[in-house]
Image (cartoon, rainbow, N blue to C red):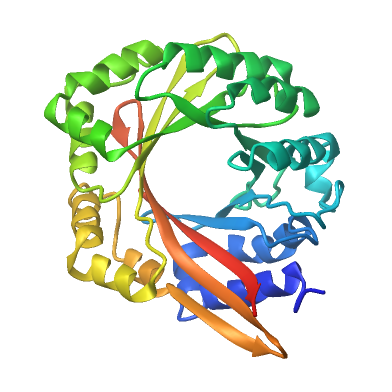
Amino acid sequence: MKLIDNKTAFQILLMHAASDSRGELLYGDSMARVKKIVPDFLGNGPFPDVYLESPLSGDPYIDISLTAIFDDTSETNYISSPLAEGTDRMMEYLRTASAKYPNISGGFEIDTKSPSPGAAAVHFQPREHTFLTAGFCEAIGEPLYGQLYEEMVQRLNGSWKPSYFGLFRGRPGLPLRVGGYLGQEEIRECINDPERIERAFKAAGFTAYDDKMVREITSVMAVSPGSNEFQFDIFPDGTVGNIFSLSTNFAIEEPEAILASFKDGDGAKYIDLLKQWNIADDRWKKGIGATFAGALPLGEKKLTLSMFPQWLKVRWTDMKLQPAKMYHLIKAGEIT
């Protein structure tokens, strides 16, 4: 039996996230919608990976990305939110596929920024198991998007190979968001030879870039201590949209190391670049200040809770920089 249910753990984590004036400064009035809407997505199995997405300049808000985690006790149809209606087959597909291929994952994107959130979007990360894509898209009634993803995998068959995608259900005409990861070796190659980035863009069919944007991309890569994540949008007719994103994974889960990085290490260099471009203001300090990890004894076990900044994202629309975003990962678990 679990020490506390997922909804209770989530509310505790949100209380911490919003404390010290962070709620209003980082998340605005959308935090109230998060508290109301997201708990029905948490289920009764293992606590999912929940990311809190918030901008570092402009109007504050929060969106939620949630990746389901399954174990032997996970039930097939455990998501109770009406915004997840029609995803029972998807959840069953994820449960059975992840049992055979443990490194795949999937879940929901919840638009809590909107005062009236619609049906939750979904994401799937097949990684190298591209053949699983068709079954996932059929399970949610969107087979066309599976074909689009497989076509992009064929286009980008080198170091920029896609690993995952996200889509809006039942909203024809909207793009498929396709993403993948760049390791340190590829990042170094791109910094030394920026035309490598342009070759990847041409292979993808992406045209909304110029020399200045490519230089900005290499500048982000140069201050990235970990891997980078890229994203394109591909429309149902096969054309690629005008948005490109590059995120950096800091891959640190020790509070002291995170605070040190953003004081005078790699994190500080990254933030300096964002501030130089006027796509981040000083609210990032509150975001980093949310970092914590703790264990609460409850009988013979301990409840573990944590909140870490995992990703920083830079996005271009029509070659113009947009407000940077910070992604916090919140986690809950048990140890003996």
What x and y, as percent, mark residue 133? 65, 24
How many numbered discs, if any? Answer: 0
Residue 189: in sight, yes or no? yes
Residue 120 visible to the viewer = no
Q: In the image, is residue 127 above or below residue 64?
A: above
Which residue corresponds to the image point at 26% horizontal and 31% vertical from the top-left? 186
Residue drawn at (70%, 37%) of the image: 100
Kindly indicate the quadrant of the structure image that contains residue 97.
top right
Q: Is residue 30 above or below residue 244?
A: below
Residue 26 falls left or right of residue 111: left
Q: Which residue is drawn at the image coordinates 44% and 68% (left, top)?
A: 25
Near-viewer residue (260 or 2): 2
Quadrant where the C terminus is found in the figure: bottom right
- Does 260 appear above or below 167? below
**Residue at image coords 72%, 42%:** 99
Determine which quarter of the picture holds residue 254: bottom left
Q: Is residue 212 left or right of residue 207?
A: left
Q: Nearer the viewer, residue 28 or 38?
A: 38
Image coordinates of residue 230 in percent, x first then y, are 39, 33
Q: Answer with the quarter of the image where residue 48 lies.
A: bottom right
Residue 54 is situated, as x and y percent measured from the top left of the image, at 47, 56
Residue placed furthest toward the left: 192
Q: Return the residue found at the far top.
A: 237
Name the foreground residue: 283 vs 240.
240
Image position, residue 135 (x, y; %): 74, 23
Left or right placement of residue 246 versus residue 12 in this view: left
Question: Quarter of the image containing the N terminus?
Answer: bottom right
